[in-house]
Image (tube, helix red, strand yellow):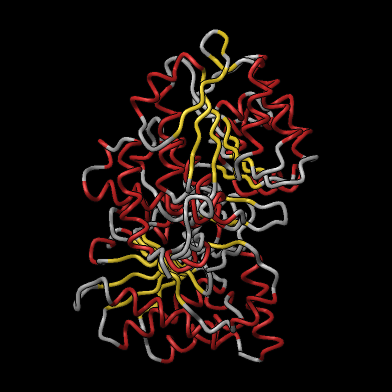
Amino acid sequence: MRIVTGEEMRKLDRITIEKVGIPGVVLMEQAGCGAAQEISSRIGASDSVLIIAGKGNNGGDGFVIHRWLSHWGYNCTTLLLTSREQISGDARINLEILYHLNEDVREVKNEAELQEFWNGIGKYDLIVDAILGTGLKGEVRGLSRRVIEMINESELPVMAVDIPSGLDSVRGVPLGVAVEADFTVTFGLPKLGLLLYPGKYYTGDLVVQDIGIPDRVVKEAGIYRFLMDDELCRKMLPLRSEEGHKGTFGRVLVLAGSVGMTGAAALTGEAALRSGAGLVTLGIPKSLNPIMEVKLTEVMTYPLPEENGRLSREGIPEIQELMKKVDVVAVGPGLGQSEDLVKILEVILKECDKPLVIDADGLNNLKSLLHLLKERQKMTVLTPHPGEMARLTGLKLSEIQTDRVGVAERFAREYGVVLVLKGVSTITAFPDGQIYLNSTGNEGMGTGGSGDVLTGILSGFLAQQKDEISIPAGVYVHGLAGDIAADRGNSRSLIAGDLLRGLALAFQKLEVKR
């Protein structure tokens, strides 16, 4: 499913109205009726509903909701935050219908009138927020701001029409204040801000309502943001031939680990194997080899020269030879930081002619080598969490978190990499501008080693398919394994090893063999 900004959705509406010929009032009818059906499925037969409407098309959707709910026997009141005369266009058509039907419509034009009405708020069972739509630019002020604050203080269930009023449709941040909805019915396509935190908090349960925008219009609009789901993931998973063997399923080299960080290396290597790679070799400081041979059975280990418990530049010739024998190289988990590691990474960036995945300490050693990313001919995948992204870019953490998609998109384009910006929701950005938002995962995955498992999954997928489109699928499977692990136990007690055990069930759910 494609993801849009508010501006892009308005463009799709405009094309549908002006070029396809579907009138705006028909789209509004589809939106309002669909939202009313969702409300009806969630409330009791005798419940009373308060629709709070602004003067734009968001309010118009609210008028349609009122009409349908009333038609089905619900007690409805519309609170209009302006005068009747200020409503125009398709919204005015639907407001006039309510007046013709003698429906309960109350106009409030100042805070005193609002407070007088609000004294009787206890008789309602649900509030429908139809105040402000996706076109909001500046901070919410005046009567709209006050009523949003009162909605949030009311403790009544709230449904938001298209987007919680006050929420930025792109960044998912409140513009001063935003409605805290229990569920949101959005129209046509999901808006970007509904899928990012803190927007997901304000959105509550998200329902996407089809309003009849033709698929052709969406495809021709040049929107390349996608929401990952089971169906899309299945299409991206590496193909598995029944005649395949350990050679055809690919070879992975993982350079990872240091004294005290053997777990990161072990998790990455095993995750690569459990994701379907045929052979995995783990290059580690030689003093760790006896430990890793006990930890791991199926993953091969290769002891490399070390200094102070970390890989040494003396091992570069051996690493160069190892890279020639594999299909994918992964660098970073548990490596530590040193001048030697920077030198090793520099050689890899210049000489590795295979897909390369860089994570964790690989990223921490990368800062002075960013220019080399632009020179690489083969795919490079970076998997930073927000803190690592801040160190790579020099941006503040708050700047990363309030513009996650924008930061990821710009970095991927500038450096020609596939960027996996971890978090809620994890974003995969491609150099050509494609963006994939992940929809799996849970807070239990905020634990040491979870990222190492992701690095292994991505490496394993690339070994089998060598196609960058498998990266969003790897992110999705990683989150799905975490969700399965949490469902079978508890998200609070989840550890990275549980993700490894959840992988088989994740693949089973996604029907890998097809």
Note whether 402 is above or below 283 in the view shown: below
Q: Nearer the viewer, residue 464 or 160?
A: 464
User: Residue 213: x and y, percent?
Assistant: 57, 82
User: Residue 60: x and y, percent?
Assistant: 51, 77
Q: Nearer the viewer, residue 202 or 250?
A: 250
Which image quadrant: the C terminus?
bottom left
Which residue is farthest top? 308
Q: Residue at x 31, y 48 (%)?
A: 502
Note whether 426 is above or below 240 in the view shown: above
284 vs 489, left or right, is right
Q: Nearer the viewer, residue 449 or 226?
A: 449
User: Residue 186: x and y, percent?
Assistant: 47, 69
Q: Does the rendering let one see residue 107?
A: yes
User: Residue 197: x and y, percent?
Assistant: 48, 47
136 vs 126, left or right, is right
Q: Residue at x 25, y 85 (%)?
A: 73
